Image (cartoon, grey):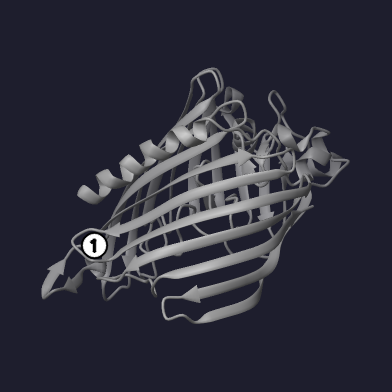
Amino acid sequence: MKKVFCRLLAILFLSPIFVSVAPDAAEAIPAFARKHSIPCTMCHQQFPKLNQFGISFKNRGYRLPDEKGKFVWEEKVWPIAAIGRMGWKSTDDNAGTRVDEFVFEGLELFSGGTLAPRISYFIDALTSDNLPLLQFNDILPDSTLNIKVGQYNVDNYGLSHPRRLTFSSYMVQTTADRDDNVTFSNQGVEINGQFENSGLRYILGAGDGSTANAEDRWFKSVFGYLMQDFGENNHTFTVMFRTDESGTAASPGDSLTFGTGVQVFGAGWDLTAHIFNFSGGNDLDFTENSKTNSYNAISGTVEGTYEFSEKLLGLARYDWHDVQDSAAEEDAIVASLQYHFVPNVKLNLEYRTSDVDVGGTSNAAGDEKSLRAYLRFGF
């Protein structure tokens, strides 16, 4: 628990620094901007990070307030977008080995909108984590109850893997597979909705989970998010939970995640801080110092942004992941400068340094320092 308190103190220490600074320029993928004839800044704080209006727009099934949606053949503009990232990376590990390489993260081609009044869709053509989904909107009026079915990403927007501003991933753990963090894929069903006047949004869903278990049972995972806006600047407070089956049929396990976080805005500045507690199943038990321990990890992040000019954005982040009852512990600091050529094309210069203590079930290779320069674009 001492380590947890240290991290919380770090959050409290860093928060005032970011509260005194401010970015207000934004950039976005203009697929929906073209369709609805609205500026990209209507939905995006920075590319590709959503603001509250963008979150509400997505939750409504890619519809504006009071909009029922059209049949897909009635649309004058088909909402198709592409996003990609490429660049150069230089890495130094704890053995003093340096590796320089060109990195192409890939290209996503996707479309979303309405198939018919009150029926929305999303499809990602080039990746496996976003197969087609359908959402049936306004089961209760004003998008207070919608039903989503298919395969899709689940996240809390303030801390989203696909919408993160950096190349470096968060260290947060919400599933047995740490590569599937912050945002996780669900194949199943969820109900979601929002209450515009109160600023309350919710998600409750179930699906196949992230397990390799061969057991033929569909609802292996249950999850929920509750997001509440507060204050004059629509800050957001989030709580979440997730259960999941993990392991294999021969070595099964059940995990449970609880998390909470806050996203704070001002006259342009942005601060995001989250903490998560992940408890793994029997399949993740580990032996260290001749003792068998249950897997329990506490992880989190605090991230702030600052706008130096209309086109130059600065970002700083502190991540941690701590396996309790083990020497396994990781910390990382990420800093980046992001130059926006146009609203949806930016150049990132990003530095990351990590400090790793290896212990039971740690998947870390050791300390590392890296420098990246890459171009991210969306059209």
Q: Residue at x 83, y 47 (%)?
A: 78
Give neighbour class at mark 1: few <14, some 14-19, many 20+ (Cα, 10 Å): many
In the image, residue 101 lies at what x, y percent?
64, 77
User: What amino acid is labelled 1 in the image?
Assistant: Tyr
- 176 displayed left or right of 61: left
- Which residue is under mark 1? 295
Q: Residue at x 60, y 39 (%)?
A: 306
Looking at the rendering, which quadrant does residue 226 occupy? top left
- 276 displayed left or right of 343: left
From the viewer's perspective, is residue 149 above or below residue 374?
Answer: above
From the viewer's perspective, is residue 262 above or below residue 83?
Answer: above
| Observer able to see residue 170 | no
Of residues 21 and 240, the one nearer the viewer is 21
In the image, residue 335 lies at what x, y percent?
54, 53
Local secondary structure at mark 1: loop
Of residues 283 and 355, the one nearer the viewer is 355
Of residues 307 and 221, the one nearer the viewer is 307
